[in-house]
Amino acid sequence: MVYKINTEARCAVIGYGSWATALMKILLENESRVGWHIRNPQVLEHIRTKGSNPRYLRDVRFPRERIDVSSDINQVVDQADIVILAVPSAFLKDTLAPMTVSLQDKFVISAIKGIIPDEYITVAEYLNQHYHVPYDRIGILSGPCHAEEVALEKLSYLTMVCKNIDNARILSHKVATDYLHVNPSTDIYGTEYAAVLKNIYAIGVGIALGLGYGDNFTAVLISNAAIEMNRFLAQSYAFERDTCASVYLGDLLVTCYSQFSRNRTFGVMIGRGYSIKSAQVEMKMVAEGYYASECIMQINKRFGIDMPIAECVHRILYGGAPAAQQMEELTMKLI
């Protein structure tokens, strides 16, 4: 029997970063009350008393009387029907560790564009394997949508992915606003891996820019990244998908070109000679592509798919290879 979402299901967000904050803004456009789990006591108190996040998207004001904010993840999850995960993948294990409430009777949506470090699996796979959440109760929210532009209410597009298209449509309505269009889809695997890969490619673009390559080369690099992404998705999990759609190509483009892209910024710093550690410290935000680079290389050992751009980025980030030399060698492999 296929699980069907109740249109009145209550939502909660786990996380307090820029994307979690943007999601709260979006949900409060449509929902009467929304739960919010925040681990940081200073951020929690500021939201509770001032109605804004002092660290991310500080200009966004929340109706405090409609937010049930708590540092107790069990309380937040217990009171919700739909749990939206919006923490960096590197922190997901620690965030969920104190949880004793079962997720099996919840619908869990991953708004995380990353792979679980050391596990080499996606968030959906992690939820299924470690928390026994059935795949028909897992959703993916993805697309070319930066939190900073959501805060400014600039027109953006997302894709809501579920195994059941009716559930995807119901959830799409919960996050759709005048400035946010949401498309339903059933390609859970492709959507998750596209979101992981585009972060790696954005780091590669950033490295090239940091080394002084121009717009012409950037266009070629991104074009080849799109080809590489399509090849990986097609050979690892066959599905009738159009990788020119916004959740695939659009997300790749915005992550590679946007000033808000933390992965591109991270790559630029590496290209300019920063060490991995110094770049991470200076950014003060997580570049998901760093962790994704190692995970994708491990996953690709099963498939042996030709991935010259991802391999180049991995050699720079994890092999200590000189960025200039690696990028020069990569230029001979592009078309």
Image: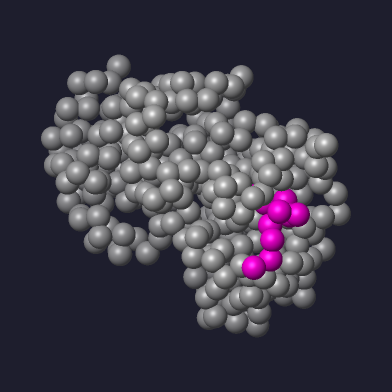
Query: Left of 24 or right of it: where is 53?
Result: left
Q: Is residue 314 above or below residue 238?
A: below
The residue nearer to you, when weighing 318 against 136, is 136
Q: Nearer the viewer, residue 101 or 255?
A: 101
Q: Percent x, y for residue 126?
A: 54, 48
* Magenta residue check for 246: no
Residue 67 locus on image (x, y percent): 73, 71
Q: How is the image coloured?
A: one colour
The relative height of residue 83 versus residue 68 in the rendered view (above or below) is above
Which residue does the image show at 25% across and 34% down from the upper left?
312
Residue 65 position by quadrant: bottom right
**Quadrant where the image shows the N terminus:** top right
- Is residue 316 shown left or right of residue 46? left
| Magenta residues, dominant SS class | loop
**Magenta segment: does it hold 104?**
yes
Q: Quadrant of the C terminus?
A: top left
**Does residue 138 sit above or below 32 in this rendering?**
above
Q: Is residue 240 visible?
A: yes
> In the image, is residue 47 above or below residue 275?
below
Q: Which residues are magenta?
A: 100-109
Residue at the extreme top: 335
| Residue drawn at (70%, 35%) of the image | 163
**Residue visible at 74% across and 67% down in the picture:** 78
The residue that appears at 55% across and 73% down in the rendered structure is: 39
- Image spot of residue 128 (x, y percent): 61, 46
